[in-house]
Image (cartoon, rainbow, N blue to C red):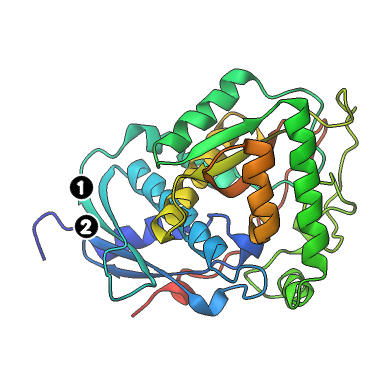
């Protein structure tokens, strides 16, 4: 072992925090291998949503979010990290290797550390107050660090078209072979399960037409005063990349995590929305009619102020560290 290698036990603490990252249907499709000074991130193909995510975009994006959470956790622990993405051309599931050394970590990343524990996916209605341009600007800036672009959809006509695209995607998915079964499987886990979307994270009613229609749950929802035009004060941002390869999806996941944690630090509520990218027709329509850009949409993120009197959402379950380690 080199003199400056960080022990596995220290790395395990950082990986444990990275497990709080969001993932599609809370499938947590990642595996990790730890040796002194090195952390490997691997995709877990056994957790692919074959009907919902046949091209693995959601799976890799979820792993990218965990990779960014890991970098935040390492920086907060005053450890420097060098990330080598897609280090093994012969192994498609090996997404990243992180070399860790003692020394001051990235201060900007470290400032996001508390948001790892505070962030929740909030499917309830948001408050009527609009998100400030300054807050939106910070989210846009953090995404660019990972080669992605966040497009705030604020023009009324574009927002209407985006709402239509999201609704169309939801309608198409309801009739897609296997989709309903996957939704049922991951929203009706057994009582002791440490994955999936529990009833406590699903609202008793659909909060907005933009949201995926999960089975009803036990999460109470406030009824904030609607904003002009019938929307709450939320803003939808579309995350895009110039390419559409595995590396683009991984970086998009990192950009997603950066945006979600940055929003959380600012006291904002967030909801990642992946359905419009899971249907090829609506993904193409999102690029052509909403963004009018050749870039590739990877995710829609809903940002807003929590509704008045909104209670704290329970943390969704996560698998034990031992269950995701490769030996």
* Residue beneath disc 2: 6
Residue 25: x and y in percent read: 66, 64
Q: Is residue 312 visible?
A: yes
Q: Residue at x 73, y 43 (%)?
A: 312
Q: Is there a contact, CB below 8 Å, between mark 1 and mark 2?
A: yes
In the displayed structure, would residue 174 be above or below residue 110? below
* Residue beneath disc 1: 102
In the displayed structure, would residue 150 be above or below residue 19? above
Residue 84: x and y in percent read: 27, 56
Determine the CA span between mark 1 and mark 2: 7 Å
Q: Is residue 214 visible?
A: no
Badge 2, how many Cα within 10 Å: few under 14, some, many 20+? some
Residue toward you, 277 or 102: 277
Q: Secondary structure at mark 1?
A: strand
Number of labels in the image equals 2
Residue toward you, 317 or 48: 48
Image quarter for residue 186? Answer: bottom right
Residue 178: x and y in percent read: 74, 78
């Amino acid at each position: 072992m080199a003199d400056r290698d960080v022990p596995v036990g220290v790395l395990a603490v950082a990986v444990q925090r990275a497990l709080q990252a969001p993932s599609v249907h809370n499938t947590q499709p990642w595996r990790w291998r730890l040796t002194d000074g090195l952390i490997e991130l691997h995709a877990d193909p056994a957790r692919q949503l074959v009907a919902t995510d046949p091209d693995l975009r959601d799976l890799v994006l979820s792993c990218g979010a965990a990779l960014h959470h890991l970098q935040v956790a390492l920086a907060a622990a005053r450890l420097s990290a060098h990330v080598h993405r897609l280090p093994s051309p012969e192994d498609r599931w090996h997404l990243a290797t992180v070399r860790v050394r003692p020394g001051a970590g990235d201060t900007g990343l470290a400032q996001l550390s508390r948001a790892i524990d505070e962030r929740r996916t909030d499917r309830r209605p948001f408050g009527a107050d609009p998100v400030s341009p300054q807050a939106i600007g910070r989210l846009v800036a953090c995404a660019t660090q990972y080669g992605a672009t966040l497009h705030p959809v604020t023009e009324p006509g574009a927002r209407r078209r985006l709402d239509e695209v999201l609704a169309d995607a939801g309608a198409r998915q309801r009739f897609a072979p296997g989709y309903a079964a996957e939704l049922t499987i991951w929203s009706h886990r057994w009582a002791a399960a440490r994955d999936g979307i529990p009833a406590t994270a699903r609202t008793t009613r659909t909060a907005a037409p933009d949201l995926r229609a999960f089975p009803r749950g036990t999460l109470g929802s406030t009824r904030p005063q609607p904003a002009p035009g019938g929307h709450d004060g939320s803003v939808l941002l579309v995350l895009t990349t110039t390419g559409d390869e595995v590396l683009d999806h991984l970086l998009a996941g990192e950009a997603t995590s950066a945006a979600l944690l940055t929003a959380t630090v600012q006291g904002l509520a967030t909801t990642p929305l992946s359905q419009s990218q899971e249907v090829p027709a609506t993904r193409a329509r999102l690029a052509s009619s909403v963004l009018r850009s050749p870039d590739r949409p990877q995710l829609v993120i809903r940002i807003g102020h929590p509704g008045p009197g909104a209670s704290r959402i329970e943390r969704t379950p996560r698998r034990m560290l031992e269950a995701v380690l490769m030996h």
